[in-house]
Image: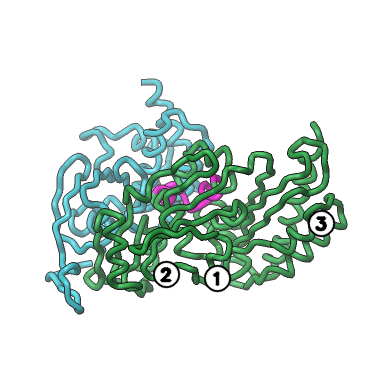
Chain colours: A cyan, B green
Amino acid sequence: MSHSSERRGQGGGNNRAKSELSLTINGKPETVRVFPMERLLDVLRQELGLTGTKEGCGEGECGSCSVLMDGKLVNSCLIPALQAAGANLTTIEGVAEGPQLSALQAAFLECGGAQCGICTPGMILSASHLLNKKPEPTLGDIREVLAGNLCRCTGYMQIFEAVAEAARRKSSV
Amino acid sequence: MRFDPADYELIAPGTLQAVVALLADEPGKWLPIAGGTDVMVLYTAGKLPARKLVSIWNLAELRSIEVLPNEIKIGAGCTYTELREHYVIAQEFPLLASAARWTGGIANQNRGTLGGNIANASPAADSLPALLAYEAELILVSVRGERRVPYVGFHTGYKKMKLAPDELIRAICLRRCFSGYLHYSRKVGARNAQAIAKVCVAALGRLRGGVGGGGDAIDDVRIALGSVAPVPLRLTEVERIVSGKSVDRELVQLAKKAAVAAIQPIDDIRSTARYRTAVTGNLVAEFLEQLRATGKTA
C-alpha cells in the first residue's frame, strides 16, 4: 500500500488527513505520519519497514500478524493506527536479545518448529505472551494460546514441543 | 487493495460524554469501534458502509466490572479476556465465561468486547445465548440520559436491534441469583477457537429442592440458542412444556419436537439447516438429561 501524497476526503473536515502517530516499538520511540484508519500491520510493514510481522488472512483468523501491544497479544491487521497511539509494541524484530536468539527462537529452530516461516513470527509472539504470563505452562495452555495461529507446514507438534522446550530452559536458568 | 484508509475518518474523543455528544450531533452517521474484531474485518474486505468512525476502545467509563450485592454490572467495553479472568463471572456466570473462552483466539479475546458482540448482532455470536439465559439487562446511554432495557427482545431481526441512532451500549447487568442452577453450554462447530458456531446453546435449569436435593420436577429453566434463527433465540415454548415436569423419555421427545419447531435454521457456509435441526434437538435432550441427573443425590 502506498500513499504518495496526502489526501483529504471529500465532504469536509480534515480528519481524513494523515496525522502524526507516536508509539514505542521494541523499546524505541517512533513517530510516523499515517491515516487514522491505516492498519497497524501496514504501519509496521510499510511505514517502518518492519516486515517480520506477516499478513496472512487479514481478518483475524490466522495470527500471522500477531504483536504484543502494551504486553497483550493482538492481531495487528485488526487495529486501526489511531488506537495504537502511545502504545508500547513488541514485534518479532524485538524478540532477540541483541545478536542472541531468545530461548523461544532457539527452541523453534532446534525442534523444527519453523518451516516456511510465515506463521513463525506470530507463533513466537503468541508463545511469548503465554510465557510472560505463565512461565511453566501445561500443554493445554500452549495449545490454547496458539489456537489463533495457523500453520500449514508443521502439523503443530514441533511447535508445541518448541514452546515447552523454551519454557523448560527458561525455568532451569 | 480493497480499501483505502484515506476514505475513512476515525476520531477518538476520549470520554463517554464526548462520544455520545458526537452521536447526538449526527445520529446514525458515526460507527462506534471498540476492539475492531468485527469492524476491521469488514473494512479490510471493502464492505464497511460507514465512513466515519468513532473509537470507544479503552474508554474508562466502559471498562469496569462492578460487583453489587444483587447484580454484576459489566462495562460494555470489557474484553473477553477480562470476562474470563473475573472471579465472579467465572463462579456465578459460567455460561458467559465459557462463551468468552470459545470466542476467537487469545488475540481476539484481548480486543473483542461484550458490548461489541451485542452491537454487531450476529445470530451466531457465542456470548448472546448466555445473556438470554441469564435474562441480562442492558444500560443504554445517550445525551438524553440512560435507560435500562431487557436484553430479551433487544435483537428484533437479522442485525436489527432496539438501539436508537444516538445511543451506545454502556453496560450489561446480570442478577446474581443462579447459584443453585445447572449451567449448561455447548458450542458445536469445526473447532472452538476461531471457528464460528454451527449451533451454540446456553441453558440454565433447577429442579425442585436444588442441585442434589432429591426432587425431580423442573422448577425453573431457560434455554437459548445461537446460529439457528436470524437472532439469538430463547426457546420459550420448550421451557413452558418442561416446566413443573419430571424429565423422562417422553418429555425429552416433546421438548425436542418443540425446539425443532421453534428454530429457523438455514443452509450457509458453515452448516446446513438439516444438521442444525438435528443438533438442536440433541442439545436440548442432553441438557434435560444432565438436569435430571442433578436431582440424584450422590
Residue B180 tag number:
none
Lateral position of residue B174 relative to residue A151, left or right: right
Which residue position holds label 1? B156
Residue A116 in sight? no
Instruction: Write down the chain letter for disc 3.
Output: B
Q: Quadrant of the N terminus of chain A?
A: bottom left
Q: Which residue is drawn at 31% across and 55% down?
A: B16
Mark 3 or mark 2: which comes first in sequence?
2
Which residue position holds label 2? B164
For the stretch drawn in magenta, what is the main secondary structure?
Answer: helix
Q: Do labels 1 and 2 share a chain?
A: yes
- Neighbor class of circle 3 (other Cα within 10 Å; few <14, some 14-19, many 20+) is many
What residue type is disc 3 on? Answer: Val
Q: How many numbered marks have been drawn onto this rendered protein structure?
A: 3
Lateral position of residue B295 relative to residue A53, left or right: right
- Residue B106 in the magenta stretch? The answer is yes
Q: In this view, does A132 lie above or below B18?
A: above
The residue segment tinted magenta is B97-110
- Residue B272 in the magenta stretch? The answer is no
Helix, strand, or loop for circle 3?
helix
Q: Nearer the viewer, mark 1 or mark 2?
A: 2
Lateral position of residue A158 relative to residue A74, left or right: right
What residue type is disc 1 on? Answer: Thr
Pointer 3 with pointer 2, Cβ within 8 A = no
Residue furthest toward the bottom? A10
What residue type is disc 2 on? Answer: Ala
